[in-house]
Amino acid sequence: MQARSYPAIVTAEEKITEGIVFSGVDEETLARLDVFEGSSYVREWVTLETGAGAWAYVVALGKERLLSEQPWDPDDF
């Protein structure tokens, strides 16, 4: 999958990103997603603009160097 662009969230104070919230995801599915995402991402509980919380996959510390400077384009994904 080299030379491909993928979306990623980087931990940063007071920053906002867009995304989609999926509800009803059970623990078994989250565990499978953890394996799929691998060691480059960690699942973190994040606060949404509404004040509610949700799980998100965030780039693991030390893996930021793997990210491109180019913005992600969902039309190219």
Image (tube, helix red, strand yellow):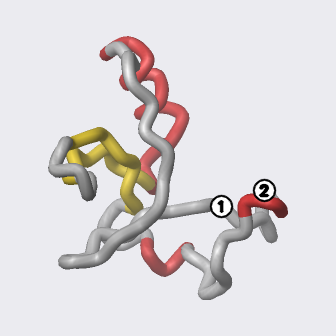
Q: Position of residue 60 (x, y in %)?
A: 35, 61
State left or right for residue 55 relative to residue 35. left
Give yes or no for contact between labels 1 and 2 (Cβ–Cβ under 8 Å).
Answer: yes
Q: Position of residue 39 (x, y in %)?
A: 42, 49
- The residue positioned 66% from the left and 71% from the top of the image is 72
Identify the secondary structure beneath mark 2.
loop
Residue assigned mark 2: 77
Q: Considering only order in the chain, which callout, 2 or 1, is on the residue closer to the N terminus?
A: 1
Mark toward the viewer: 1 or 2: 2
Residue 36's place in the image compared with 64, above or below, is: above
Q: Is residue 55 above or below residue 14?
A: above
Q: Could you tell me the amino acid type at mark 2?
A: Phe
Find disc 1 in the rendering and name its residue.
6
Residue 36 figure quarter: top right
Q: Name the residue: 39% across, 24% down.
A: 23
Give neighbour class at mark 2: few <14, some 14-19, many 20+ (Cα, 10 Å).
Answer: few
Instruction: Using the image as rendered, state which of residue 18 and residue 70 is in the foreground.
Output: 18
